[in-house]
Image (cartoon, rainbow, N blue to C red):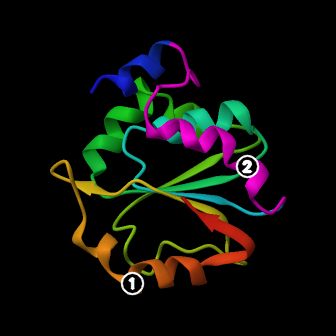
Amino acid sequence: DTSSVYIAHDPGRLTNCYWDVVSIMDPLLPKDGTLGLLGLGGGSAAVIAHKYWPLREMEGWEYDQDVVEVARPHLGLAELEQAATGALVVTCGDALEAQSAVEGGFAGLFVDLFASSHLLPQLSEEETWAKWLKALRPGGCVL
């Protein structure tokens, strides 16, 4: 899949992939609050979200530090981390762990968690989704 490479040449361009859903997410969310990106990868969803909703603060989790290190200079993550508004905070770690929470709750969560091109088994567990729902502020949603 070369969608992330596409974005590097045209930041914020829709990809015709599931990441594009984040471009319509903001009107569904409470006005205040952070958008959590669980499974940041190369940052495709973050770049799209920032283009369409530049004031929305974002926090992304990516398990693989190497992916983040490549994405910073080549796929636009560094620019998002330094943005004056709608900045992205990147955390390298497990999005399934307790650290994937923000004070006051997330306005929304965009879940994009895979390992070896397969959905994580935890995504079929009710406890995982219940935990994420508890991490939302009132009116928040998970996609």
Closer to us: 63 or 125: 125
Please check the rendered image and state whether residue 2 is part of the magenta-colored stretch, yes or no.
Answer: no
For residue 73, the mark is none
Describe the element under mark 1 as helix, strand or loop: helix
Please state which amino acid type lies under the numbered disc 2: Asp
Residue 44: image location, x then y, percent? 47, 35
Q: Whole-Å distance between the Cαs marked 1 and 2?
A: 25 Å
Please check the rendered image and state whether residue 28 is part of the magenta-colored stretch, yes or no.
Answer: yes
Going 37% across and 20% down the picture, which residue do you hit?
5
Residue 131: image location, x then y, percent? 49, 83
Closer to us: 101 or 28: 28
Going 73% across and 78% down the picture, which residue do you hit?
104
Q: Residues within 10 Å of mark 1 (few under 14, many from 20)?
A: few
Question: Disc 1 marks which residue?
Answer: 126
Please state which of the two labelled residues, at mark 1 or mark 2, is closer to the viewer. Answer: 1
Left or right placement of residue 132 versus residue 50 in this view:
left
Among the two numbered marks 1 and 2 on one chain, the one whose residue lies closer to the N terminus: 2
Q: In the displayed structure, would residue 7 be above or below residue 19?
A: above
Left or right placement of residue 6 versus residue 77 in this view:
left
Please state which amino acid type lies under the numbered disc 1: Glu
* Residue 18 seen from this side: yes
Going 52% across and 35% down the picture, which residue do you hit?
78
Q: Which residues are magenta?
A: 10-31
Question: Disc 2 marks which residue?
Answer: 26
Residue 67: image location, x then y, percent? 30, 42
